[in-house]
Image: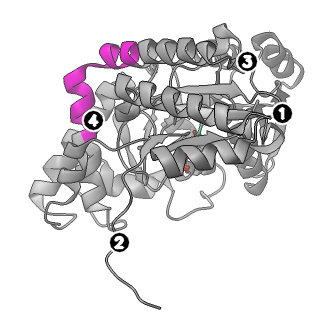
Amino acid sequence: METKTFNPPKRILLGPGPSNVHPRVLEAMARPTIGHLDPAFVELMEEIKSLLRYTFETENEITFPVSGPGSVGMETCLVNLVEPGMKVAVCVNGVFGGRIKEIVERCGAQPIVVEADWGSAIDKQKFEDILKSNIDVKLTAFVHAETSTGAQSNIKELTEISHKYNCLAIADTVTSLGGIPVKVDEWNLDAVYSGSQKCLSCPPGLSPVTFNERTLHAIKNRKTRVQSWFMDINLIISYWGSSSRRSYHHTAPINALYGLHEALLLLKEEGLVNSWKRHKLNSEKLISGLKDLGLNTFVKEEDRLPELITVKIPDGVDDLKVRNFLLEKHNIEIGAGLGSLSGKIWRIGLMGYSSNEENISRCLAGLREALEKFKA
Ligand SMILES: *Cc1c(COP(=O)(O)O)cnc(C)c1O
């Protein structure tokens, strides 16, 4: 086999993640690697923590990026808070809620599932009824932005209800952070995780997390040891905690962290509120253009995410042919439907650096051409 240096094609990433990476982030990642305990790197870590506090709108001391993709952030929250034999209320309205449920089971706990249709938000009354009738549930988990369907749930309300029933709440903000408001302190969120490659315009591989005092208290008072060595927060904070005495836990992904730092800096320069506005405005532009092409959205307006728009595939249109055409002819990637939505919807992401007017017009022009070509 002949092997050579890989030069990726230039793609416009309009799927469910990763999104396009800002050139400043790529440049930052190409800078020379230094030691993970170098004083200069320790300073960078403090800046990353401070920028993450800005992004999550929190004062939480324990706010840092876990080394690993969003799924590792998900597991970090779960393995530190779930103990064998516990009951955990898990909201499932798509793929990622389903993944939380599976991790809860693998932790030896029992998930109590609060279900909603794929494409709908979690119903707060249904959630409250389940907590009311399961007084032994002490932990809940839900997804803010369900990337598999394009629907958002109200995590402020779900957290309030969790606290009313004496539960800690875990929130997945992988696709929401940077795209729509995630107000950790104002909403009293307990344990929160996100991802670098959705609305933060960064490559995949890092998962920002933030834990409040209540969460840390619960972790300290566990009866059993955290089952994962790598994700045990008690051990990780020997590296990410205080800057005065930092010791080796694992070798941090140095260059990936240069990238995240630059991406968070970009977000701060734009301003969180402006970023939310840009995502909303661009989503409205795309949806109005899709309507002109006779395409309808899958999620009803009040539950719809601006950064991930799901579109019903019209009868007789070949899903795969359209997506292949967009990729091969226009270098545009859009996402397919997952599970029961496979062949029924497309998932068009306008996340982070990908959320701009030029991408919208290219996507609409490509879709117009594809629909004419592959109409039944
Ligand atoms: C993408 C995503 C994840 C998983 O992130 P990975 O980086 O793919 O591991 C988790 N939750 C949601 C809502 C996501 O969109």
Q: Which mark is residue 264?
A: 4
Q: Is mark 2 within 8 Å of ligand 1?
A: no
The location of residue 139, given as percent across then percent down, is: 69, 33
Crowding at dot 4, Cα within 10 Å, few <14 / some 14-19 / many 20+, comes out as many
Q: Which residue has dot 3 on it?
A: 165
SS at circle 1: strand
Pointer 1 or 4: first along the chain: 1
Number of numbered markers: 4
Magenta stretch holds residue 12: no
Mark 2 or mark 3: which is in front?
2
**Viewer can see residue 220:** no
- The residue indicated by pointer 1 is 113
State the extent of the magenta-drawn residues as a range. Answer: 263-278
Q: Which residue is mark 2?
A: 6
- Residue 199 location, x and y as percent? 42, 33
**Which mark's residue is nearer the viewer, 1 or 2?**
2
Q: Disc 2 residue type?
A: Phe
Q: Earlier in the sequence, mark 3 or mark 1?
A: 1
Look at discs 3 and 4 and give the one toward the viewer. Answer: 4
- In this view, 282 is above or below 88: above
